[in-house]
Image (tube, coloured by chain):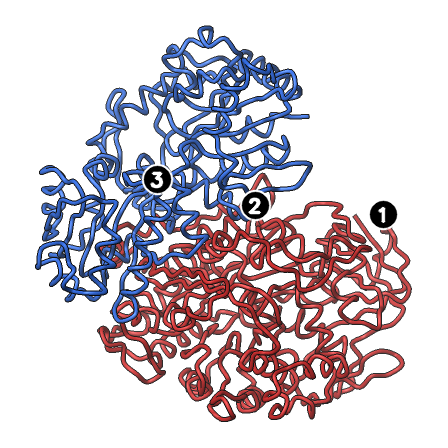
Chain colours: A blue, B red
Amino acid sequence: MNDKSAIARFCTFCSMVCEGDAERSGSEMASESFCSRRNREHDVLQGMLRSRGRLPDSLEQERSLARANSILENGRDIFVTGRIQSVETARATVKFVERAQGSLDLWDSEAAFDTVQAIQRSGFYGVSLAEARESTTLLIIVGDDSLLEEYPRLPAALSAGRSIPALLLGSWGDESIHAWRQAGFDALVVDCDVQGVPRSLLQASRSATSWPWESQVGDWLQQASFTTVLWSNRNLQVAHGDLWIESMMEWIAKRNSDRRCAALAWRGLDVGFQQACTWLTGFPGRIRYRKGVLEYDPTGCRAKAWLQKEATDRPIVGHRRIRNPVLVWVDDTAGSIPPPVLSSGVPMIVVSPAGLSGTDPKTIGEEIIWLPTRLPGIEVPAEFFRGDQTLMVHGIQGATLAANEPEVGNTPTMVAGDWLRRLVAR
Amino acid sequence: MITKLRGVRIVDGFSAAGGFSAAGGLKTSGGFKMADGVVKSVENADLYMIDGVLSRVLPDGKKIDAEYALPGRTVMAGAIDLHTHIGGGKVNLARLLMPERPRATEPMRADKPWLGPLSCPVPNTWETGRRYLQMGYTACFEPAMLPANARQSHAEMRDTPWLDTGGYVVLGNDRMLLEWLQAGVPQSMITDYVAWMLTAHAACAVKVVNAGGIDAFKFNQRKLDVDEKHLHFGVTPRQILRALAIAIEELQLAHPLHVHCSNLGVAGNIESTLATIDAVEGRRLHVTHAQYHCYGKEGPHGYSSAASALADRVNRTPSLTIDVGQVLFGQTVTLSADTMHQFEHRSLALPRKVIFQDLECQAGCGIVPFRYRESQYVHSLQWSIGLELFLRITDPMRVFLTTDHPNGGPFTGYPHLIRLLMDYDFRMSIFDRLHPDVKSTSPLPSLRREYTLAEIAAMTRMGPARALGLENRGVLSDGAIADVVVYRDESNAESMFCDPEMVFRRGILVYRNGEFLADSVKSTIVAGMADSGRGADWYRSAANRAMWHQRYGYSPDMVMVRGEELTDEGRLIEANRVHRLV
């Protein structure tokens, strides 16, 4: 079964894990099946040009490792964050955090934890992508144009080649509406405040007369045997996202009493981290190890809160001598490090492909050490989850792509896990 | 590396073919004697582990590297759990759903703190491996591996230390199969498809969950009996079961079709369970978590035990095996691909939260936290039905000890369950606490059978090994894999089985008196279709690949689990091992 036709490549840029044969042309990777609209391939390959256009050689990397270990040995408050997406990096990160007796929270985990907390309080009714594609008789899409900016291939992935009524609730521009219609959906747009959508749906289920929207919406809801409600956590502009999800689940649960209904809550690639962290520790993140005991603290153990505290406290109490905070940034993307992280003034170890592109560490005032890695799913095979958390794919099969192969070829092939295993703490 | 265990009592399983009495083995001063006269327990014996393989004798000229004098200790092969939910989408969702530490049902033991309660009814992978090894288990099988979740299931099992693992791929609600059955395609096409699904998902067996029912629920059908038609596809569970059973027969898989019957937990479901057994027309069959599938409708609450009917059928049908899915009192979380029936039980959730998922046109997932209570009639009845099955089925090689972890209770309850089976007085002491209507109607007090150690070895070692076609496991015979457990002899079977003195994996001492001494090689057990010639053609067919792509939106390549994915940090995974029916 290893004939040539079996070789395929899966796009690991936006969590749709689309499939296609990509070709490289100069510094660009092209495939009609990939999310080329956003030119993210271009960004990624540019990112791979590394910091200041050069990848440190082996000797420099070993020196960096020694310095990183020196910082960690003195560190007393080690916080690990970043953009961890592949299962391999997640495994290595969790093991490192345990060894370092540190804390762990993904960067920008707020939206993901809205879902987590809603699930842990009251549960969830979900549907996977292929199931939604085949079973849905009414698709309700909640959000705005940012959904398709983030996941441009979502309408095509949900299209089953038949006309399906699609109700777009929120703020939708012509381009988005066109995209859904082009994919075969009979789209009806209701411009409304997304925050109030669950309440309106619940009211409507209690009394038909309280329906706030057009009558066709009510007809569609009456006729639909399998309703799928689609939203993306990261693109949902609502206050108290966890409560919003719980309200939506209340409506979905009620609807299931006499017909079928489920949510397709699309997540980013960071679901890979959440899944792996859950099977390794029992918790989806926001964990800390204290004296060998694992603690789960979904409200307290937050990377942004930790950084804010460090930035606020440091000039006042000079606590570095007491706590010796160290930030370890682990990244599976080619993106740059967010400014709040760079400006926190905390000694930082960066384990990432892109390093500090566009940033001069001397201006930061604290030591920042970069341990460069290959880009999972692009330069090295890696395992990722599709954004619905159902399908785990072995990203990139066949030949690997690298924009600057000659340069990379002179340095060790390191992935994040390799560095994390070599990092030692007290 | 040669290790000698000196002066031990070797307790091995045995075959009851030829008529083993319901009263159990005849206990003799020299060990445990079968009805056919074959003594399978040997006192004061020596056992050698030579480079990971067992031998009863030391070859000439060989030097012993390590020797343990263990007079009076009982030695068994590593135990095998053939039905335990330890990896995959719904298992991980259950972990996510239950972050709270459950109320401990038993106090911590100050002398053995490592035997405390689980952190969660569905523990993380490391805790799962650790706690299984601490009970002497060395191989566990995830019985419900959805095709779309197979890679994740293997990844989780790869992260579960010390255990050999395998998975059963879930078929029978996949729309491709349903469409083919609707279209009446030749059986050979279905058999090839099954072969490919086994290969592609690195599975070692096929499981069917509520045949057709999970998919019917997606079309809002709330019930599907064995001869009832799926409203959309027009096929019946009987057709699905028959087609899959034939495929397994044609592929000569060691493990028969592993069936979660229709009507899980429904009063009166014994009829559909017996109809399910009939549906495969005499072919081999494994009925899983049978306790949940043998209920009558009689009694004060319209819910009664039909264990005797199922046990009679098992006793009369040599081609039939079951695992029990015993209920143990306390907090747990139930999880199943059977969304149709889990959804019916959603109002029983405790704590009050549930997860349901409709998955990839292949199956579903329903997670309902549950607390089994002695004072509750149905829970008490379920507890007694499970024990009835154990005690009424005469051949311990065909009834396996499971709680359907975590559905009936966490796997850490196995030592307690073993004591229930081995100690009539203890069993009755729990029985006395049950709901009065169960106490007044249950035949359990009249079942005075007490399992022997040899029978326990049969139902937890040799029986599951044979059912899975693992010829060199589950026994302590020459040439078997040296997964060996050393137990202290204790009058309390629960104490004995919850805390072995030593556990060896491949001849290496990995656990001793609460301490984990070494990691061990892990293996993944797969069906190994390569030499059958089946499956590859299915994959090569452009029409099949196109159909797959049309149904799922991606090619079969995306889900194919390759051998190299089953290795971890250089540890050898014995992939593609062929285990066939002997």
Spot occupied by residue A328 in the image (x, y as percentages of width and height) = 53, 25
- Between A346 and A182, the residue placed more toward the observer is A346
Q: Are marks 3 and 1 in contact (CB under 8 Å)?
A: no
What's the mark number on residue A29? none
Is circle 3 on the same chain as circle 1? no
Name the residue carrying label 3: A268
Answer with left or right where residue B203 lies relative to residue B15. Answer: left
Image quadrant in which the C terminus of chain B is located: bottom right
Question: From the viewer's perspective, is A214 left or right of A266?
Answer: left
Could you tell me residue B468's position as x and y percent?
56, 68
Q: Amino acid at mark 1?
A: Asp
Whole-Å distance between the Cαs marked 2 and 3? Answer: 21 Å
Nearer to us in this view, A98 or A418: A98
First of labels 2, 3 by sequence position: 3
- Residue that mark 2 sits on: A281
Mark 2 residue element: helix
Q: Residues within 10 Å of mark 2 (few under 14, many from 20)?
A: many
Q: Is residue B324 visible?
A: yes
Q: Residue at x 61, y 74 (%)?
A: B400
Q: CA distance from mark 1 to mark 2?
A: 38 Å
Q: Do the residues under discs 1 and 2 have CB atoms within 8 angstroms?
A: no
Dot 2 and dot 3 within a common chain: yes
Which one is in front in this view, the residue at disc 1 or the one at disc 2? 2
What residue is drawn where x is 9% and y is 55%?
A214
What chain letter is assigned to the residue under label 1? B
Q: Is residue B426 depicted above or below B155 in this figure?
A: below
Label 1 belongs to which residue? Answer: B65
Which quadrant of the view contains residue A148?
top left
What amino acid does circle 3 point to? Answer: Gly
Q: Identify residue type, mark 2.
A: Thr
Q: How far across and down, in percent of the image, does residue A413 sit?
A: 49, 24
